[in-house]
Image (cartoon, rainbow, N blue to C red):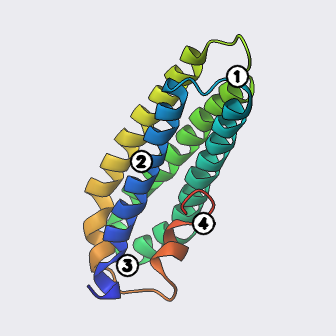
Amino acid sequence: MDRATAFGDELIRIHEHLRETLDDLRDELDAGAVRGATRRSLQEHCVGFCAAITAHHTAEDRFAFPRLAAQYPELAPVLAELEHDHQLVAGVLRGVDDLVSRLGEGDDPRLVRSGLDGLSAVLESHFRWEERRIVAALNSMTPPAGTALEMFVTSTAGLD
């Protein structure tokens, strides 16, 4: 597949990786990772995941969406809605981060699980809508300078 048709596919690949990472976080919590070193590991994974989502959305807002808008002006309302979604997701991420940072001995991990489930629902809805609305345009756009990773990720933290 040449670079001109890869951007939408790359977006889906990144979304899949983020979905899998969130599933891993929930599995880690379900396995009882709330004591000692495992609690710290869960907190580190949550911080890394939040950083990866933030980097992904920041790159979309700064690089991918302006390039899409330049080639497909009719997508401007969709891109504006996606940017608004990114702000909503950021708020949910802050709430999850707060829950995880307070998780300790004796705390109820169900609160964190509920937060992760809510985050998962919000992200899934956002990812699916974004994929339906812009993947075809991404796959057909004239390739800009740079790579798909530069368009969708401002940092590779959490995407390794």
The earlier-in-sequence mark between 2 and 3 is: 2
Q: Provide the residue designation for mark 4.
A: 156
The earlier-in-sequence mark between 2 and 1 is: 2
**Mark 4 burial class by Cα count in 10 Å: few <14, some 14-19, many 20+:** some
Q: Position of residue 59 (x, y in %)?
A: 57, 65
Alpha-carbon span between mark 2 and mark 1: 22 Å
Q: Provide the residue designation for mark 1.
A: 103
Above/below status of 146 relative to 63: below
Alpha-carbon span between mark 4 and mark 3: 27 Å
Looking at the image, residue 81 sits to the left or right of residue 97; the answer is left
Give 32 or 89, whichever is nearer the viewer. 32
- Badge 3 amino acid: Gln
Alpha-carbon span between mark 1 and mark 3: 46 Å
Assign a secondary structure to mark 3: helix
Asked if marks 1 and 4 touch (Cβ < 8 Å), the reply is no
- Badge 2 amino acid: Glu
Q: Position of residue 80 (x, y in %)?
A: 46, 54
Q: Position of residue 63 (x, y in %)?
A: 54, 72
Q: Quadrant of residue 131?
A: bottom left
Above/below status of 160 relative to 23: below
Assign a secondary structure to mark 2: helix
Q: Quadrant of residue 144?
A: bottom left
